[in-house]
Image: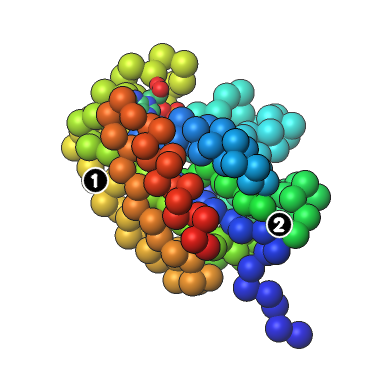
Amino acid sequence: MVKPLRHPFRTVVVTGVPGVGKTTVISYLEKMAKEKGIKIKVVNFGTYMLNTALSEGLVKNRDEIRKLPLRKQLGLQERAARRIIEDASNELGDEGYLIIDTHALVKTPAGYWPGLPAHVLDELKPDMIAVIEADPELIAKRQERDVTRFRSDIGGPEGVRKLMEYARAATLASAVRYASTVAFIENPEGAPERAAKELLERILEL
Ligand code: AP5
């Protein structure tokens, strides 16, 4: 039997280095879409991994996930992807947009870890992978200013630049498996709603 290449709803994976503002951009996107009467479900991949890890007593907070042994992360990653699609299928049925806030690459003590490897893509089947970007200097400043979150040190603007470069390569590699489009979206300083508007325009073309 031929496996379907897409879910009935559109699946949009939104990536970006920690602190670039993708969660902020997605919250504007959700508001704008709802105002237009568009059916939309937003999920955070890390939250699905965290809830699984918490229930298994593996971590105490979100940022400990990336420090877990990779074999533990692998299992969490796989279960998170499967549960996201189960929940989206129940909620969206056969229409609308599933927006997944996640990472193309996660910096771990054992090396860079792909956020969208084959077993994740086989569940998600993304129509699009969006990459939210901004000037590395600004991202480093946003990370410093954001006292609501503890983020692992990425290494200042130079570390952010390097992670962005590798994440771009990882995103393009992930896009090949399901012929996902890749959309690079700039999140301009002080105007995340502009990035959200551009992202909305692009997903409506899917
Ligand atoms: P996750 O929850 O995604 O956390 P994170 O990477 O630490 O940080 P965020 O991604 O939440 O930052 P953000 O870019 O969304 O920025 P925000 O909008 O908050 O992931 C947690 C963990 O889960 C990962 O580290 C990983 O371990 C794991 N994980 C997730 N997906 C995985 C996968 N697929 N495989 C394996 N592991 C996975 O904004 C930051 C600040 O900037 C805020 O203060 C905001 O107000 C400000 N800001 C935003 N936009 C602007 C703007 N335009 N101008 C000025 N300020 C702005």
Q: Tell me residue 203's x, y (percent).
A: 50, 54
User: Badge 2: few (under 14), some or many (20 or more) residues near its Cα, within 10 Å?
Assistant: some
Which residue is rendered at x = 37% and y = 37% of the image? 194
Q: Residue furthest top?
A: 147
Q: Residue furthest right?
A: 90
Instruction: State the residue in front, 167 or 178.
Output: 178
Coloring scheme used: rainbow
> Mark 2 = which residue?
95
Q: From the viewer's perspective, is 78 left or right of 16?
A: right
Q: From the viewer's perspective, is 164 left or right of 110?
A: left
User: Badge 1: few (under 14), some or many (20 or more) residues near its Cα, within 10 Å?
Assistant: few
Which residue is rendered at x = 24% and y = 29% of the image? 138
Which residue is rendered at x = 44% and y = 55% of the image? 202
Mark nearer the N terminus (2 vs 1): 2
Quarter of the displayed picture in which ligand 1 can be seen: top left
Query: Regarding mark 2 in the picture, which secondary structure is present there?
Result: loop
- Type of residue at label 2? Glu
Which residue is rendered at x = 40% and y = 66% of the image? 173
98 vs 21: above or below: below
- Circles 2 and 1: CB distance less than 8 Å? no
- Which mark, by number, is residue 162? 1
Instruction: State the residue in front, 47 or 90.
Output: 90
Q: From the viewer's perspective, is 168 left or right of 148?
A: left
Q: Tell me residue 69's x, y (percent).
A: 53, 43
Query: Regarding mark 1 in the picture, which secondary structure is present there?
Result: helix
Which quarter of the picture shows residue 155? top left
- Type of residue at label 1? Lys
Label 2 residue near ligand 1, CB within 8 Å: no
Residue 164 in view here: yes
Q: Tell me residue 11's x, y (percent).
A: 59, 56
